[in-house]
Image (cartoon, rainbow, N blue to C red):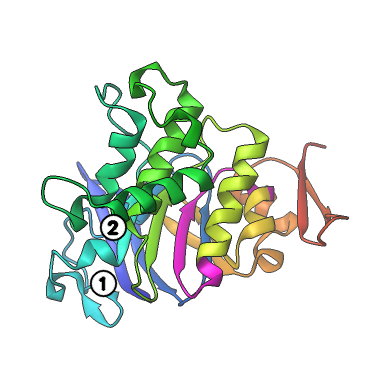
Amino acid sequence: MLKACKISYSHKKISILENIDVTINYGELLVIVGPNGAGKSTLLSMLANEMAHTNEPILFKKKTFEDWDQKELPLHKAKFSQQNIADIPLTVMDVVLMGRYPYFNSIPHQSDVDAALKSMAETDVVALKSRDYNTLSGGERQRVHLARVLTQLENDVENKLVFMDEPLNNLDVLHQHRILHTVKNFSERGNTAVVVLHDLNLAAQFADSIVLMQKGKIISHDKPEHVFTKEIISKVYNFPCTICLNPVNQNPLIIFGT
C-alpha cells in the first residue's frame, strides 16, 4: 500500500527523522508509538505527503503522490490531525460534511448526508448533529472530527488509506475502544490505517504491527509481541516495566513501575 525509503527531516539544523525506511501492507493496522519527541507525528505527516521532502519518492499504490490526480486522491486517502481549528461556527453535521467536499460542489447530495450519518453513528455523535460545534466538549469535538475523516473515505474505492495522529485524545475508555474497533474493522476490509498512539496496551491489543520510534529513528518494526518486550520498552522509555499476557486476549500487557 505504502512504501517510503530513506526519510529524513531536519528543522533549524535539528534532526527530527533520520534515514527511515517503512513499508505498510494492504489491510494492515500499523501503530506508531514512542516517547515524546520521537518523531511520530512528523513521520506520519511525511508519509501522508503533507511535508516537503527531498527523499526518494513515497509510493502509494505503486504511484508517487505527484502522479495521482489531485481530485481523485482524497477518495483514496485521508488524515486525522492532532490539531484542529478551535472555533468553527457551524453545526456538527456541517463540520462532518466537510469530509464530503471532494464529492460535491455547493450542496451535498443525499448520498453525502447518508455517508455523514453513517460515520457519525460509528463515532457516537448522531445525537449531536444539530448542535453548534463550539458548544461541544473536547471529547465530543474529537469524535466529530473523526467522523469527518471517516466520511471522506465512505465510498466504493478499494484499498483506502487513513492516517490518524493521536485520535484518542480527550476520549473516555468506551469511546477509545469504540474508535479503535472502527479503525480495526476498516483495515479488515482490505484498507490500511496508520495510527499514532501513546497507550502501548491499546496498541498491543489492536495493531497488526508496531513501529517503535526513539529520537527520530525506528527502533523496532514488527508484530506487537516482538516489539513489546521488557528489554526494549524499558530501554526506549527509560522506565522499568513488566510484560505479561493479557488474560482476555493473550496480547502483551505492559505494566510500568518497579
Residue drawn 13% across and 76% down? 67
Q: Is residue 241 above or below residue 61?
A: above
Snapshot quadrant of residue 124: top right
* Label 1 environment density (alpha carbons within 10 Å; few <14, some 14–19, many ≥20): many
- Is 47 placed left or right of 240 in the picture? left
Q: Which residue is mark 1?
A: 58
Query: Considering the image in quadrants, where does the N terminus appear?
Result: bottom left
Q: Which residue is situated farthest in the top direction here?
A: 135
* Dot label at residue 254: none
Q: Which residue is situated farthest in the bottom direction here?
A: 62
Q: Is residue 35 above or below residue 54?
A: above
Q: Which residue is situated farthest in the front direction here?
A: 110
Q: Is residue 178 above or below residue 48?
A: above
Residue 215 appears in the figure? no
How far across and how far down the image is residue 32, in percent? 50, 55
How far across and how far down the image is residue 43, in percent? 36, 55
Q: What residue range appears in magenta?
A: 187-201
Query: Considering the image in quadrants, where does the C terminus appear?
Result: top right
Q: Secondary structure at mark 1?
A: loop
Q: Earlier in the sequence, mark 1 or mark 2?
A: 2
Q: Nearer the viewer, residue 244 or 121?
A: 121
Q: Which residue is mark 2?
A: 46
Q: Is residue 31 above or below residue 12?
A: below
Residue drawn 66% across and 49% down? 202
How far across and how far down the image is residue 39, in percent? 40, 49
How far across and how far down the image is residue 100, in percent? 26, 51
Q: Nearer the viewer, residue 258 or 130?
A: 130
Q: What type is the residue that disc 1 sits on? A: Ile
* Label 2 environment density (alpha carbons within 10 Å; few <14, some 14–19, many ≥20): some
Q: Secondary structure at mark 2?
A: helix
Residue drawn 57% across and 61% down? 184
